[in-house]
Structure formats: C-alpha cells, structure tokens
Image (spheres, rainbow, N blue to C red):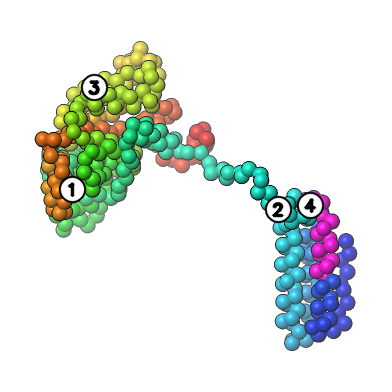
Amino acid sequence: MSAAIPELKQFDEAELDRVFTGLEAEVAAQARTLTGGESVETFRLEWLGRKQGRLGQLSAAWLKSAPVEAKRSLGVRFNRLKAQIESLLTENVEAGGTGDPAQVLDVSLPGSAPRIGAEHPLVKTMAEVVGVFQRMGYSVGLGPEVETDFYNFEALNFPPNHPARDTQDTLVIADQEQKPLRERLLMRTHTSPVQIRSMLEQAPPLRLVIPGKVHRNDAADATHSPVFHQVEGLCVDTRITFSDLKGTLDHAMKALFGSAVKTRFFPSFFPFTEPSADVQISCIFCGGKGCRKCKHSGWIELLGCGMVDPAVFEAVNQRREQMGREPVYDTRKISGFAFGMGVDRIAMMKYGISDIGLLYSGDIRFLEQFS
C-alpha cells in the first residue's frame, strides 16, 4: 500500500474536493481487499497509526501551510475521512474481515447470552427455599430493612421491657431518643415485620413467604454474623390448624433435602406464636444414624414455627382501625401459622461450609467453587 501524500496545489474548495474525493476512493478500495485480522490491522496502522499514519502526515503537511480561511474546510474534510476509515474498520471487524458490510449481522443466527457469573450460594439457597413455597401457592413479600419498633417488636407481641426482647440484641438507629418508643428506628432483627405490613394491606386468606436480610448485634464467629438472611412464612385462613403447619413444613423439608428426610417437632417459645415449636430434620449427612455434624443425635434443628398468637391479630386489627380500615382478622373466624428459618445455616449445610464469615468475605477464590 502506498503512503504517498497527494499534491495539494491550492486551498480552494474545488481543489480540496478533488484531493479528498481521491483519498476517500482509495480508502474504500483498500477496505474491499481486506481478508482477515492481519490485513485489517495493517490498514488501520497505515491510515490511523499514531506515528506513521497517513492521516496524521496529511494533517501535518496541509494544515501547517494552509491559510487561515482554509483551515476550517480542511478540518471538516479530515474529520469526514477519519469517520469513513473508522466505520470501514468496524464493519470489517464485525464481518470477520471480509469487507462485506452485509455480513455484519446475521439475524438468523441464535443469540448469545452474556455471561454474568454465578449465583452467590446465599442467593441460590434463598431462591431454592422461596421456590418450594411458591410452588405451594405462596406469594413473596418484601419490606424495609430499617424498621420501627412497632413493626419489629410491639405488633409481634414483644411489649416494651418484655424479657423476650433480650433474645434479639438489636442494632438501633442513632438519635431516636426523642421519639415515642414505637416510632423509633432500628435494623430489623427478623423478616416478621413484613407479616404485619402485609396483614395491614391485605385481608385473609393470606399465604406469604418472606426472604430477606436481617441484623443483630451478634459477635462474629464461625456460626454467627451481625448480618444474616431469613426466610419466613405466614398462612392465614379459616380452619388453619397445627396439622396444616406440620404437613407444610414436612413437605418443604423433603423438597429441599430429599424425600428420605424426616421431621419432628418439639415445644418451644416465641412471643408471636402459641403454641410454638422447634423443627428438627433427620441428619442429611448420616441419614439419622448419628455423626459429628449432628452431634451423634441423628437430628439437626433447623427452624422455628407455631400458630399465630391471637395478640398479633389484635394488634393488626387495632392498627387497621387507626388507618381507617376494617378490622378483618377476627380470631373467632380465622387462624394461621408462621415459620422462619436461617438461609445461611441451610447454605452452610448444603455446600459444606464451616465458617459463616466466608459467605460475606467477598473472596473470589471461595466463591468460584460454586460457579
């Protein structure tokens, strides 16, 4: 390819048109002969190279000697020529160096989805748990992580100064002392406030599964973190019984861990349910025979549950009346159950993770194991 600089006899419009028309024709002719990546790169360097590129040489030779009144016309033509070269380069790269712009896009070819990485084990586990309950007809509820004391405690039957509040060491928002207690802001300690918000907005029947991030003032160690994730559930309707709760959770555990998994319930205490129970599943590692991971008991405690305490329905009714809505949660007609489980613990079990801190470390070497 020639790198000669054409002779520019004068700087009037006719002469500029003649010279640049010739250059544009030369560029187009060269572009039609390109056959692959090496020839495309040679073409680019010849015209746009920083040191020896013809466009730079032409600019240095002509603009320096051009009269002031001709510089604008020269600049316009240089920009147009450069845009033509860049466009032809783009077309050749996209067409595989064939020089045929018609091959830039073949709409008959299947699309290629961008690779966006792998799901974090917590995100994947939470989606699996939520999916189990969605298939049972539950809708998904979401709510704010910064809550008021009313939604996080009071409406859930945690009265002020009640000892049950001590079980949830709470991270409170600063400078809230001047507000009434029920209006003070805090980081939610569970996703249960979404249950209250949902009942305020919707009349029964209600079937809701609630995933989300929660916060407690826990010291970080291998099994505790001040930030973790929960999935809670709520079912409210007429004639809901503890048998419905047991059947629902037994089905969910089998869907998550396999049909061989068994469940058993032990009496427990939660302020917002009565009666309440802790749920254990047969050890998924030893099949219930006993091993180090289940402390040789054959069982692993996994979640808590119970029938919704009537006091919770009463708090919802009172709040609905304050909002000008009908108090539709009549405990003489309806009942319900609730449950909650830690997503982090389930993820650690499913993926053999021994330290919860690894889930929040952001260490790509750890996360790549799950891609």
Considering the numbered disc 4 on the image, is that residue within a helix, a strand or a loop?
A: loop
Residue range highlighted in magenta: 23-37
Q: Which mark is residue 104?
A: 2
Q: Is tag 1's residue or tag 3's residue first in the polypeptide sequence?
A: 1
Q: CA distance from mark 4 to mark 2?
A: 10 Å
Magenta stretch encompasses residue 135: no
Quarter of the picture containing the N terminus is bottom right
What is the three-letter code of the residue carrying label 2?
Answer: Val
Res. 330 image quadrant: top left
Q: CA distance from mark 4 to mark 1?
A: 69 Å
Q: Is tag 2's residue or tag 1's residue first in the polypeptide sequence?
A: 2
Nearer to us in this view, 159 or 250: 250
Q: Identify the residue position indicated by label 3 in the image.
A: 265
What is the three-letter code of the residue carrying label 4?
Answer: Thr
Q: In the rendered image, is residue 172 in sight?
A: no
Q: Report if the CB atoms under discs 2 and 1 are less than 8 Å apart.
A: no
Q: Main secondary structure of the magenta part?
A: helix
